[in-house]
Amino acid sequence: MKRNVKVGIIGCGGIANGKHMPALAAIEGCEMVAFCDIVVERAQAAAEKFGVEGAKVYEDYKELLKDESIEVVHVCTPNRSHSFITVDALEAGKHVMCEKPMAINSAEAQKMLDAAARTGNKLTIGYQNRYRDDSLYLKDEAKAGVFGEIYYAKATAIRRRAVPNWGVFLNEYEQGGGPLIDIGTHALDLTLWMMDNYKPKYCVGTAYHKLNNDSDQGNTWGNWDPKEFTVEDSAFGFIVMENGATIVLESSWALNSLDVREAQTTLCGTKAGADMVDGLRINGVHNGRQYVTKPSFSAGGVAFNDGKKGESPAIREARAWLNAVVDGTEISTKPEQAFVVTRILEGIYESAKTGKPYYFD
């Protein structure tokens, strides 16, 4: 970056420790100067591990926002608080990276868009799967017109038995849902981005509470408490776009399936198709013969976008974001795109509740 930038972290739990803070720490010129969490010990531990000398610790995020030296804030809290913390941060003159999903529903997400427009401050949402090698390659192919018109796609986020049983993941009030809003959101974002199609017409959704009460669980992270498991264990959506394109969205934390794939997309176009079933595979017909091409990401190649070769998707995402703030480059994950993701997820949940198709305006 052309200059240093001071960052404040709001929410010092799993996603902050697992993604945001390590990524920011890897970027020269990024100074994490303030940390906030309702469990102040977590903020203190984060400050000691990732903060600059003299980094401040807060229990109330509004106190952190009073620090005029902080230019960027990362919001890493449970889903319900994404919107009001982001709006407050934007109003306080900060640029905001908010962890996915954008908000708990489209009304709250709209407040974030409005605040960004009103203040002129930058806003982005954390969809780091866009920055994987295979995703960036596939996006370049889509932009080049390799697939022609993409009219059918699948967004896949299927876990067999990998229910996150810590924090508030199982709490519907705090999170707004289960696997659909947690990991389905990544798959949907990836798919819409590849298609460059953000105009949904209607959707049909189903959500299931079939395995929540299992006593014989076989869960990756140990048994969950059935009494606390108030969100769906799986959810599925059928989305029709205004131009007639179709997207099938699959998400689960617990499903008796061996087709286990997360944050993946399948694209079917008029010229070619692609999937991520066994690495990235591009298929089509050439000279009267069917072909399958599998790009190799193990060696060679050039640096992707704002990242460096070998960097994690989280570091690439953070670097692109900070470059947008400091150098004025284009924001890669636009909040308007993330808004559509939230809107579609909301539509699937609503359709699942009513048993009827959900029509978008």
Image: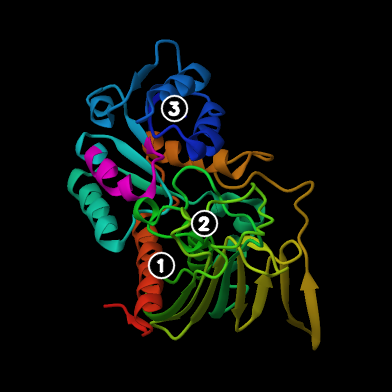
Please, what is the three-letter code of the amino acid marked with disc 2?
Answer: Pro
Numbered disc in front, either 3 or 1: 1
Q: Mark 3 sits on what residue?
A: 2
Q: Return the x and y of residue 68 as percentages of the image width and height.
A: 24, 23
Give the number of the disc on residue 226.
2
- What amino acid does circle 3 point to? Lys
Image marks 2 and 1: residues in contact by CB distance under 8 Å: no
Q: Earlier in the sequence, mark 3 or mark 1?
A: 3
What residue is drawn where x is 35% and y is 67%? 343
Q: CA distance from mark 2 to mark 3?
A: 51 Å
Q: CA distance from mark 2 to mark 1?
A: 24 Å
In the rendered image, which quarter is residue 360 located in? bottom left
Instruction: Quickly name the residue at label 1.
Output: 345
Give the percent coordinates (x, y) of residue 137. 64, 58
Image: 98 above or below 102? above
Q: Provide residue 304's location: percent of width, then percent of height.
A: 61, 47
Q: Which residues are magenta?
A: 74-88
